[in-house]
Image (cartoon, helix red, strand yellow):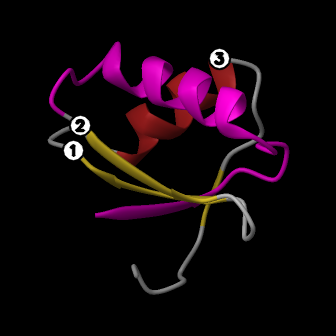
Amino acid sequence: MYVIHVPDMKCGGCLGAVTRAIRTVDEAARVEADLERREIRVSSGETEAAILQVVREAGYQAEPTSAPAL
């Protein structure tokens, strides 16, 4: 599971866009979010680099974090 900080993700619409972007590379990806902390937790067979890339391509900043998954 990857924990990714997405500082400009502010609402459910943003989360939907991020989730759709991730599912373009892994349809089975599981995405959970903490909008208050602006973090997503992603379970995917894809690499963290691939996930970060598609989130960034969708127009969002995205950085890996060492925060523990909730």
Q: Is residue 44 left or right of residue 33?
A: left
Q: Quadrant of residue 65?
A: bottom right
Q: Is residue 3 left or right of residue 59?
A: left
Q: Quadrant of residue 25?
A: top left
Q: Residue at x 53, y 39 (%)?
A: 52
Between discs 3 and 1, the one toward the N terminus: 1
Magenta highlight on residue 14: yes
User: What residue type is disc 1 on?
Assistant: Ser
- State which quarter of the image contains the N terminus: bottom left
Does the residue at mark 2 contact the one at mark 1 (Cβ under 8 Å)? Answer: yes
User: Residue 44 — which label?
Assistant: 1
Inter-mark Cα distance, 2 to 1: 5 Å
Q: Position of residue 3 (x, y in %)?
A: 47, 65
User: What residue type is disc 3 on?
Assistant: Glu
Q: Categorize mark 1 by other alpha carbons within 10 Å: few (<14), some (14-19), many (20+).
A: some
User: What residue type is disc 2 on?
Assistant: Ala
Between discs 3 and 2, the one toward the N terminus: 2
Along the viewing direction, whichever of 11 and 26 lies nearer the viewer: 11
Q: Is residue 11 left or right of residue 30?
A: right
The residue most toward the front is 12
Query: Relative to 8, is 63 above or below?
Result: below
The residue that label 3 is drawn on is 57
Q: Residue at x 65, y 17 (%)?
A: 57
> What secondary structure is marked by label 2?
loop
Residue bounds of the magenta highlight: 1-28
Between discs 2 and 1, the one toward the N terminus: 2
Q: Residue at x 15, y 30 (%)?
A: 28
User: Residue 66 — which label?
Assistant: none
User: Residue 29 — which label?
Assistant: 2
> What secondary structure is marked by label 3?
helix
Q: Position of residue 67 (x, y in %)?
A: 54, 84
